[in-house]
Amino acid sequence: MMNSPSKEGCAPIHQVRSWYDLASICPEDPRNLIADATLAATTGELYNSSTFADQTWATTPLSILSTPKVSALGTDDAQKVADAKQWEFSHLTWNDDANLAIPLQKVIFLRGGTDWTNALSIAFEGTPIEEVQISFLNNAATRGDKQGTIPVIRWADGSWSGTVSLTLVLRKYGQYTLGIWTYDGTNYAMYELIIISVP
């Protein structure tokens, strides 16, 4: 038997036992994981989205292009810069083997901690993308908060195509599934990105 919902009116995640429960949990703020996010060198903004869920979905135009790169945020600290290079040398962050099962091609290893930034090269194919939102993928299964919105990190009024750099600074360690939502003026799409954040 489930316990009572939290005082906000939403069931805690540990009480989720089915899709009924998942729809009733509160969406999680992506800033709990992401300390900073930039797309094409533009910092994203926190936004309460009414469009992150419940769309007619098209095939995602996104794909990872190359191995994510880690670097030190403190570029004036030679030890941090060297540490980032050594970490990258000893960690394979993405496996692009053509024989790897397709779902595993969305799994990336990134360096957690607010001393490090992780750069991902992502292909934006087809029609230029006007808006990008990032949040936890499970948030799209919820009904949203009291206002029916979902907290996301957003970039709006853009025109992204070709190779685009996404950089993330992560607060925590662990495995997380993010949804990268895109809108090209006509079509909504969602790319699933599985992040394993390690020290």
Image: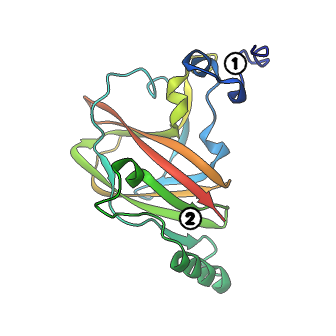
> In this view of the protein, which residue sits in the foreground, 175 or 80?
175
The circle on residue 10 is 1
The location of residue 174, given as percent across then percent down, is 64, 52
Quadrant position of the C terminus in the picture: bottom right
Image quadrant of residue 81? Answer: bottom right
- Name the amino acid type tagged 2: Thr
Disc 2 packing (10 Å; few <14; some 14–19; many ≥20): many
The residue that disc 2 covers is 117
SS for callout 1: loop
Q: Nearer the viewer, mark 1 or mark 2?
A: 1
The residue located at (53%, 43%) in the rendering is 177
* Between discs 1 and 2, the one toward the N terminus: 1
Q: How many marks?
A: 2
Left or right of residue 173: residue 105: left
Can residue 181 be seen? yes
Q: What is the x, y in percent for residue 111?
A: 59, 64
Q: At 71% from the left edge and 29% from the top edge, which residue is drawn?
A: 14
Q: Position of residue 165 (x, y in %)?
A: 39, 59
* 1 and 2 marks in contact (CB < 8 Å): no
Answer with left or right where residue 165 lies relative to residue 159: right
Where residue 51 sits in the image (x, y, percent)? Answer: 44, 25
Measured Cα–Cα span from mark 1 to mark 2: 33 Å
Looking at the rendering, in which quadrant would you find the N terminus?
top right
Q: Secondary structure at mark 2?
A: strand
